[in-house]
Image (tube, rainbow, N blue to C red):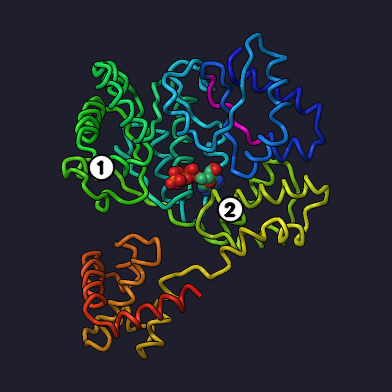
Amino acid sequence: MDIVSLWDKTLQLIKGELSPPSFNAFFKQIVPLKIYMSDLILLAPNDFTKGILEDRYLNLIESSVNQLSLKKYHVKFVLNEKDVDGLGEEVQSSSNKKNHPNLNPKYTFDTFVIGNSNRFAHAACVAVAESPAKAYNPLFLYGGVGLGKTHLMHAIGHHIVSQKKDPKVVYVSSEKFTNELINSIKDDRNEEFRNKYRNVDILLIDDIQFIAGKERTQEEFFHTFNSLHEANKQIIISSDRPPKEIPTLEDRLRSRFEMGLITDIQAPDFETRIAILRKKAQMENIDVSNEVTTYIAKNIKSNIRELEGALTRVIAYSSLTNRTISFELAVEALKDIITSSKNEEITVIRIKEKVASVFDLKMEDFNSKKRTRSIAYPRQIAMYLSRELTDLSLPKIGEAFGGRDHTTVIHAHDKIIKNIEANEEIKIKIDKIISDLKG
Ligand SMILES: Nc1ncnc2c1ncn2[C@@H]1O[C@H](COP(=O)(O)OP(=O)(O)OP(=O)(O)O)[C@@H](O)[C@H]1O
């Protein structure tokens, strides 16, 4: 029995043992990942659910699995698919179809909510999924943590697998790529490694920023890239920043990454956060009021993984305490998470407002072309603080200051660092602004 059927049957057994709210809260989101030796490895959606599954349900899960299988398994939970990367070749995986990559079944275009922050990235991914190697090659997706890059890459993979006959689609994190390369060198299996990556139709490579500074990996990836590109195979790359900002990336790779289309994903706006929460509640088949989704969406802004985690926590809390989901219950369930992030997020606007009040500037002065010292200097301080206190990229900061070039932001940042080192008065002033912003 393959892992997917084994897990499906296990779920049927477990369902009969538990109340529907508990089953829905803790079991529906588990993804069967891998069978390795005598371990059945399952992906838990978040730390909280993992803790509950391990503390309360491990015996039930293992006994149910072992009722169905001749072989005795130990069940293990991981939080990240990358955690099983080091386990060597799979014995069986959830992606048991020939040439099928290890794609998360939940990460499809259907489950992806489109909003202003990701509309362009989504459209580019759909275009690539429909015409691989014809639309944009490579497609380079970048954005902050937990904003949907991996989701979109897997969605492209699923779409292509569903459209083409036996395409070879490979999804790999750059860390896994590096580890496999190192092992192949160690075991003298370099040829095998090359064949694996140079003979695919679609290569999805996640978190490419981790190859920064790894010369041998960059060299190998350069040749993999070239042979795929020349053979008209599609390459999709993700990163937490644009190619220009990846330090110690060889120029020849950087220019290749810039050959196709580069697209970014921003943090979702309020409406998109609400839509994501609604979609998730709908997928879980659970009623959640507008008051509750609004409370979560207003307080968790910059990471969709955390947004989803908050909703899961509310659902679990309701199931554990046997109460219906209400605004009061959500506040109670999320008191640790939302108190710890109660300080308002630091944005460029807040930085500008603060610097404007300290240096007696008008808001429009930050974007103006005026270069008098009384304006240019506070403007440079505001750019410095934006670089230090927000996750925005250099080009985005430049954009937020009247469309200035990213080199202007670098210059301002370097200058203020030197000033802080040389001038105690400025250091105190800037420290005070930072502590006021942090609340
Ligand atoms: N637009 C969206 N609609 C629905 N779910 C989303 C959306 N964007 C992200 N998610 C969900 O948020 C979670 C985090 O997304 P994902 O893992 O793709 O982020 P990432 O950008 O690859 O993060 P990292 O930088 O940590 O690798 C996933 O569960 C994903 O399904």
Q: In which image quadrant can residue 72 be found?
A: top right
Q: Is residue 230 magenta?
A: no
What stretch of residues is rendered in magenta?
Answer: 28-35
Q: Amino acid at mark 1?
A: Phe
- Between the residue at mark 1 and the residue at mark 2, the CA separation in whole angstroms equals 31 Å
Query: Residue at label 1?
Result: 257
Foreground residue among 292 and 34 = 34
Give me the residue at 46% from left, 79% from top: 436
**Is residue 122 among what the camera can see?**
no
Q: In which image quadrant can residue 253 be found?
A: top left
Residue 79 spot, x, y in % from top left: 54, 38
Residue reaching furthest to the top: 70
Sooner in the amino-acid sequence: mark 1 or mark 2: 1
Which SS type dominates the magenta stretch?
A: strand
Give me the residue at 75% from left, 35% from top: 23
Foreground residue among 307 and 88 = 88
CB of mark 1 near ligand 1 (< 8 Å): no
Q: Is residue 33 magenta?
A: yes
**Is residue 145 among what the camera can see?**
yes
User: Decide: marks 1, 2 in contact (CB < 8 A)?
Assistant: no
Residue 40 spot, x, y in % from top left: 58, 22
Residue 381 spot, x, y in % from top left: 30, 77
In the picture, the quarter occupied by the N terminus is top right
Label 1: state its secondary structure: helix
Badge 2: residue crowd in 10 Å (few <14, some 14–19, many ≥20): many
CB of mark 2 near ligand 1 (< 8 Å): yes
Query: Residue at label 2?
Result: 307
Left or right: residue 260 versus residue 8 is: left
Q: Amino acid at mark 2?
A: Leu
Left or right: residue 276 versus residue 439 is: right
